[in-house]
Amino acid sequence: MSNKDTTLAPADSNRLFPNIRIVLINTFHPGNIGSVARAMKTMGLSELYLVAPKQFPAEEATTMAVGADDILASAKVVNTLHEAIDDCALVVGTSARSRANPWPVKTANEAAQQIVAESKTQQAAIVFGRETMGLHNDELQRCNVHVYIPSNPNYKALNLAAAVQIICYEIFLAGGTKSDYKQQVTEYSTKKDMDYFYEHLEQTLRDIGFIIKAHPGKTMLKLKRYFNRTRPELLELNMLRGILTAIQTAAHKKPKHDD
């Protein structure tokens, strides 16, 4: 696995969207990886991340890529989703199922406009799950927004590569047309920044007795949903962490009274 370069790459004629990556998790069939590479290249995307694929490299992947071998050759293979999205400010998860704890959901068109707009200044990722079961709940919880592709209710059998093709097509359209999505140049927190914040937040809540270790409940899950949805800017996140530090300092200074 090579080290990731977090510097935003300039666009060129062969890489229309250099700061948008497609992330595949635990892909079972190597042929699907090749088909995804082909779908990406036809729409100008070139950044492919593979999280613990069952088999890669593979001859079947190269065969199905049909000329998109360069996408496969430059694909980043990592062990965890954490490694694939750490430096991303916007992470979009794909889901075909309703969830007990719903996240903000956008259409492919709406999500594509946001992705294209924000990728001009920061890294963005679209995450696709396993062929048979999609993304797990904990993986979806790491995403800022979910995208849903509607299909025939009597036959919901959208192939992985087909789903990628639809999202890439919408990105291609959004990148080539005047978008209605207005986005100021804002430096958002990366997923790594947010992970550090969540650790700090949970420890602070434990320090003040708001979360009891033996009975944590769903407090952190609900807080993560809230902050992933609101997406604090980097300056805002730094301010929040400063508040947490002040709370911890005050809690430690508070005198303890004997019963």
Image (cartoon, rainbow, N blue to C red):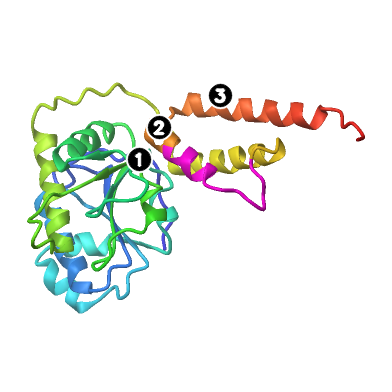
Going by the numbered disc 2, the residue's amino acid type is Arg
Task: Please give left or right for residue 56 compared with residue 7 in the image.
Answer: left
Residue 216 part of the magenta-drawn span = yes
Q: Which residues are magenta?
A: 211-225
Q: Element at badge 2?
A: loop
Which badge, 2 or 1, is on the more N-terminal residue?
1
User: For the image shown, how many numbered marks are present on the structure?
Assistant: 3
Q: Element at badge 3?
A: helix
Viewer-nearest residue: 68 or 13: 68
Residue at mark 1: 144
Which image quarter holds the N terminus?
bottom left
Q: Is residue 108 above or below residue 249?
A: below
Going by the numbered disc 1, the residue's amino acid type is Asn
Provide residue 202's location: percent of width, then percent of height. Answer: 60, 42
Determine the image quadrant of residue 64: bottom left
Residue 228 part of the magenta-drawn span = no
Which badge, 3 or 2, is on the more N-terminal residue?
2
* Label 3 – label 1 distance at C-alpha: 20 Å
Q: Are marks 3 and 1 in contact (CB under 8 Å)?
A: no
Q: Are marks 2 and 1 in contact (CB under 8 Å)?
A: yes
Specify the label residue 231 is tagged with: 2
Provide residue 61's location: percent of width, then percent of height. Answer: 19, 72
Q: Residue at x 39, y 30 (%)?
A: 230
Q: Is residue 185 above or below residue 226?
A: above
Residue at mark 3: 239
